[in-house]
Amino acid sequence: MAVLSNEEIIEAIKQKTILEIADLAKQLQEEFGVSAIAPASTAQTGGGTAVPVEEEQTEFDVILDDVGAQKIQVLKVVREVSGLGLKEAKDLVDGVPKLVKEKVSKEEAAKVKESLEAVGAKVTIK
């Protein structure tokens, strides 16, 4: 019997209907004595204690760590990305390290970081 690669198995499964896939899952559970219900949360270590499930982070904070040599350019970018007024943005830039954006998506955090680093600032995403 030839051993199929994971890619070949996936391609074969793609050709099946939802009902056929559900039946396959049931057969696999019976054959191997496993359950498809929340496998990560019921995983056990060798000592018999439950392994904590880490949730993927979905909200990020963008922190301005250092302004760099182009303070005015950084100030302009901070105003642009944060929507702050001139005084508030200046206070933020003068008081580094400071939070620029809070609880934003990974994509938005990356865009803000890229914009600030383009003008010489140092930024951390947490």
Image: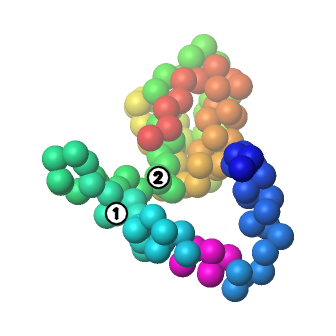
Considering every residue shown, the one lying at the far right of the view is: 15
User: Is 66 placed above or below 104 here?
Assistant: above
Helix, strand or loop at mark 2? loop
The span from disc 2 to disc 1 (Cα, nearest Å) is 17 Å
Q: Which secondary structure class fits the magenta region best? A: helix
x, y percent for residue 19 = 70, 85
Helix, strand or loop at mark 1? loop
Residue bearing mark 2: 57
Sequence-earlier tag: 2 or 1? 1
User: Is 94 placed above or below 126 here?
Assistant: above
Q: Residue type at mark 1: give it.
A: Ser
Foreground of the two, 111 or 24 = 24
Residue drawn at point x = 78 percent, y = 75 percent: 16
Quadrant containing the C terminus in the rendered view:
top left
Residue bearing mark 1: 41
Left or right of 5, for residue 62 = left
Considering every residue shown, the one lying at the far bottom of the view is: 19
